């Protein structure tokens, strides 16, 4: 860490010289650093520095020339990271002053924007940089009218960004009512609950302290059967701080037809704590678990209604969140930072489509930390994200979305207990949502909502969706466009920190351009299965570490792009290999029909060398591994004796 302003300034100038290539941008960036030096040395005010920075960029902005105004925000974040609380006040003053500058208008009379945001007032809010320090400023003393900073209470600026926004009314949350008198509490006109990072962390730490001291010991497991809510986010956060593993289960398992399923999972998980939403959930949980020996199980309800009708055996969630002293909170955080990378942190269940029975997958601390950092959705220094959390929390996507949002300092938007396309669109417009992850079915529902075309979607900058099921066989219908230009679309390249290799039939690594089974190595690969930790036949160890066998047959080209094949290769005297298809059934199509259509779809360079049905190989179904992937090497072995494959 840089210990002085001068050392940080010097490092920033050196970085600009090394990395900034465009002369005009280099000159502007150097001038910005010089202006910040005067501010950090208490030589000028925040408002004077804001005016200076505006003047530096003004000529380029007005003329329409390339400029790097986003450089300013990255520098703010970096300065706060290195200096901590010592210069927070100056940076707050500067950010507020910059966002109050007049709009920049170009020569044509148009307001200048950057990434669709008006310069300077609509650029990213970087409240997260005060995460460790958290000053509360009364702007009225400076005559400021900037009351929309994160929609805080009038005249009060909390310099944290929002950790979470819930579209549920504040009165629906007992924890929110407990903290309602806090000066940090901020509400929109519609009464939605909003918590800053400091508020959220305060309750998370209090909850973690209670979990650690009175309810469970580190390494225990917490089971939740609750809908998406701020309370669920608090439990996720507190489980990390208290070093407990959390397993988020489908609350519908509290319905009587699924009691047996819930009982099996509880037996597998052996939790110390179980959390339900309300009195109905309490009754259902007791019915489902009455035959199990769970004397030490701590039972918690989010609601306080009828809490004492259950023999006093249930605890109120809000009672577990009572504030702790600063000294206790500091000690709890210090302890949380000394974590075991191999500790179980999260347990998620598969859908069960491959084996018919959902399997619990254990994810450890190293796994989650790697996943969170490896695939960050925000650019460095960009903390203006407002991310909708739409998927049910028992899906693997939900905890990942939350962790990535917190890592990047983004705001999590909860649009409701369950997904509702109208509520989603309302939240998108009201909160100016920037990022969303949607399942294909959710995406279809949103697009089919009446009035969807008229909704303001301009704030969205990132959307992710999974692959959908193909309901029709596409090879017999025309296509209107090709989503990948020039060539066959690859799967991608390994993420930083990951390794891949392809293993051939001789169990040796193949060269680039050759086919083999794809094996991956990464700290983000799940640890083991819950019920059978020693029976991971898709995982093995060698001198290079721990590898996961995907079951996919693939190829890596010279550029490092990974391809997954849908066919196997047949030896060819000239080409080396040619594609050979194995189908469950030809469905009354001939081999010549298949070959002709492949040529029509992909061109003569992709002629199909042959095709065969499973029954010809003596197989009824495709051989699969433990994850449900087709074992293409096993198919090759079955093909080896086939005259159709050898010819």
Image (tube, helix red, strand yellow):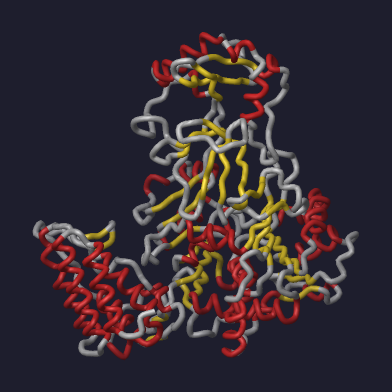
Indicate the position of residue 11 as horizontal and vertical percent values: 28, 74
Q: Viewed as shown, does residue 578 lie left or right of 548?
A: left
Relative to residue 19, is residue 599 depicted above or below?
above
Indicate the position of residue 72 as horizontal and vertical percent values: 27, 70
Indicate the position of residue 35 as horizontal and vertical percent values: 20, 79
Which residue is at a point 65% across and 14% down the rendered structure image? 642
Q: Quadrant of the N terminus?
A: bottom left
Relative to residue 80, is residue 404 depicted above or below?
above
Q: Viewed as shown, does residue 642 lie left or right of 170?
A: right
Can residue 172 be spotted in the picture?
no
Residue 153, quarter of the rendered image: bottom left
Depth check: give the residue in front, 59 or 527: 527
Residue 336, quarter of the rendered image: bottom right
Which residue is at a point 44% across and 44% down the rendered structure image? 493
Residue 621, quarter of the rendered image: top right
Relative to residue 365, is residue 177 depicted above or below?
below
Indicate the position of residue 320 as horizontal and vertical percent values: 69, 79
Can residue 10 be spotted in the picture?
yes
Q: Viewed as shown, does residue 143 lie left or right of 422?
A: left
Which residue is at a point 62% across and 76% down the rendered structure image? 175
Which residue is at a point 27% across and 85% down the rendered structure image? 40
Depth check: give the residue in front, 577 or 461: 577
Depth check: give the residue in front, 202 or 240: 240
Q: Quadrant of the C terminus?
A: top right
């Amino acid at each position: 860490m840089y210990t002085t302003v001068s050392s940080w300034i010097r490092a920033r100038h050196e970085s600009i010289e090394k990395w900034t290539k465009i002369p005009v941008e280099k000159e502007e960036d150097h001038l910005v650093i010089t202006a910040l030096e005067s501010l950090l040395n208490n030589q000028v005010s925040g408002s004077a520095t804001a005016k200076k920075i505006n003047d530096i960029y003004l000529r380029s902005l007005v003329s329409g020339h390339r400029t790097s105004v986003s450089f300013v925000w990255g520098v703010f974040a970096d300065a706060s990271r290195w200096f901590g609380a010592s210069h927070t006040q100056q940076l707050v003053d500067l950010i507020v002053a910059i966002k109050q500058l007049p709009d920049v208008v170009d020569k044509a009379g148009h307001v200048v924007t950057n990434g669709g945001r008006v310069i300077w007032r609509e650029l990213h809010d970087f409240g997260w940089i005060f995460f460790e320090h958290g000053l509360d400023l009364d702007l009225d003393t400076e005559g400021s009218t900037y009351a929309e900073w994160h929609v805080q209470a009038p005249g009060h600026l909390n310099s944290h960004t929002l950790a979470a926004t819930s579209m549920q009314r504040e009165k629906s949350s007992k924890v929110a009512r407990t903290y309602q008198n806090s000066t940090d509490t901020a509400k929109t006109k519609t009464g939605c609950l909003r918590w800053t990072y400091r508020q959220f962390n305060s309750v998370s730490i209090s909850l973690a302290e209670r979990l650690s001291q009175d309810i469970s010991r580190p390494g225990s497991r917490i089971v939740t059967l609750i809908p998406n809510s701020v309370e669920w986010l608090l439990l996720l956060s507190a489980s990390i701080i208290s070093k407990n593993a959390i397993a988020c289960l489908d609350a519908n398992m509290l319905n009587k037809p699924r009691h047996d399923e819930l009982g099996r999972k509880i037996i597998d998980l052996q939790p110390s704590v179980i959390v339900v939403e309300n009195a109905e959930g309490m009754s259902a949980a007791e019915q489902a678990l009455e035959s199990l020996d769970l004397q030490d199980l701590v039972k918690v309800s989010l609601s306080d209604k009828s809490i004492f009708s259950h023999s006093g055996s249930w605890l109120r969630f809000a009672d577990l969140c009572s504030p702790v002293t600063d000294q206790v909170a500091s000690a709890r955080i210090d302890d949380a930072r000394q974590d075991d990378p191999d500790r179980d942190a999260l347990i998620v269940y598969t859908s069960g489509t491959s084996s018919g029975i959902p399997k619990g997958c254990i994810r450890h601390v190293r796994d989650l930390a790697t996943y969170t950092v490896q695939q960050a959705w925000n650019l460095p220094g960009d903390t203006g994200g407002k991310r909708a959390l739409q998927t049910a929390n028992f899906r693997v996507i939900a905890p990942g979305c939350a962790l990535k949002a917190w890592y990047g300092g983004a705001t999590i938007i909860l649009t409701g207990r369950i997904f509702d396309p109208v509520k989603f669109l309302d939240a998108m417009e009201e909160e100016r949502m920037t990022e969303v992850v949607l399942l294909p079915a959710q995406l279809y529902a949103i697009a089919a909502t009446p009035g969807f075309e008229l909704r303001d979607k301009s704030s969205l900058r990132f959307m992710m969706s999974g692959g959908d099921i193909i309901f029709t066989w596409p090879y017999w219908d025309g296509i209107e466009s090709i989503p990948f230009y020039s060539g066959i679309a690859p799967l991608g390249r390994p993420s930083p920190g990951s390794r891949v290799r392809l293993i051939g039939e001789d169990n040796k690594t193949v060269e680039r351009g050759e086919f083999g089974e794809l094996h991956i190595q990464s700290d983000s690969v799940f640890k083991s299965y819950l019920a059978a930790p020693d029976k991971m036949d898709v995982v093995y160890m060698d001198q290079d570490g721990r590898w996961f066998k995907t079951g996919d047959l693939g190829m890596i080209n010279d550029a490092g792009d990974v391809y997954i094949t849908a066919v196997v290769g047949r030896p060819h005297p000239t080409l080396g290999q040619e594609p050979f298809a194995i189908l469950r059934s030809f469905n009354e199509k001939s081999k010549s029909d298949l070959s002709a259509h492949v040529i029509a779809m992909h061109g003569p360079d992709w002629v199909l060398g042959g095709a065969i049905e499973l029954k010809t190989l003596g197989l009824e179904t495709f051989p699969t591994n433990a994850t449900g992937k087709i074992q293409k090497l096993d198919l090759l072995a079955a093909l080896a004796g086939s005259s159709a494959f050898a010819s």
